[in-house]
């Protein structure tokens, strides 16, 4: 999946927490979110805050789908609230796709 496809996929699944997301989809969207956030913050602090708020739900959704892809529950994102938990999440997010079936779907969609 390339940059454009990842952004299109994540924004079309704006609040979809079911299913799976590939590693490339997750990291391309993460890069998009970072770049848009920086650009919006340069324009104005208030605009940057609005953009971050608008991208929060799709970021949480793609994070959940990425965790589903490795066989974990999306609720694990709550450990992001701790410093150590963020490191654990990053480790999970970089793991390769579980090509087989798991409780979240039969394969990568």
Image (tube, rainbow, N blue to C red):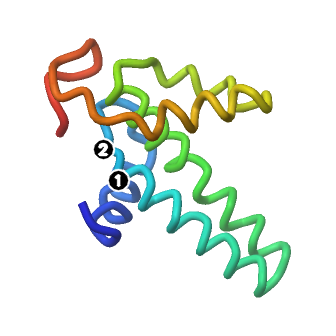
Q: How far apart are marks 2 and 1 (CA)?
A: 5 Å
Left-right relation of 109 to 104: left
Which quadrant of the view contains residue 100? top left
Mark linked to residue 93: none
Q: Is residue 74 above or below residue 29?
A: above
Which quadrant of the view contains residue 42? bottom right
For the image, the number of numbered tags is 2
Q: What element carries label 2?
A: loop
Q: Is mark 1 on a helix, strand or loop?
A: helix
Query: Quick one: quadrant of the N terminus?
Result: bottom left
Q: In this view, does 49 lie above or below 38?
A: above
Residue at 55 percent across and 20 percent down: it is 75
- x, y (%) of residue 52? 68, 61
Neighbour class for label 2 at 10 Å: few (<14), some, many (≥20)? many
The residue labelled by disc 1 is: 25
Q: Is residue 53 above or below residue 70?
A: below
User: Which sits in the foreground, 48 or 22?
Assistant: 22
Answer yes or no: do the residues labelled 2 and 1 have beta carbons within 8 Å? Answer: yes
Left-right relation of 87 to 99: right
Residue at 56 percent across and 64 percent down: it is 33
Residue at 57 percent across and 38 percent down: it is 90
Which quadrant of the view contains residue 39? bottom right
Residue at 50 percent across and 49 percent down: it is 58
User: Which sits in the foreground, 3 or 17?
Assistant: 3
The residue labelled by disc 2 is: 22
């Amino acid at each position: 999946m390339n940059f454009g496809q990842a952004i299109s996929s994540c924004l079309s699944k704006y609040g979809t927490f079911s299913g799976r997301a590939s590693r490339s989809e997750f990291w391309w969207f993460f890069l998009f979110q970072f770049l848009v956030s920086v650009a919006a913050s340069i324009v104005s602090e208030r605009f940057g805050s609005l953009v971050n708020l608008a991208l929060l739900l799709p970021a949480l959704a793609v994070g959940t789908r990425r965790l589903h892809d490795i066989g974990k529950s999306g609720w694990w994102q709550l450990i992001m609230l701790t410093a150590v938990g963020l490191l654990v999440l990053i480790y999970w997010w970089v793991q390769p796709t579980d090509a087989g079936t798991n409780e979240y779907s039969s394969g990568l969609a």
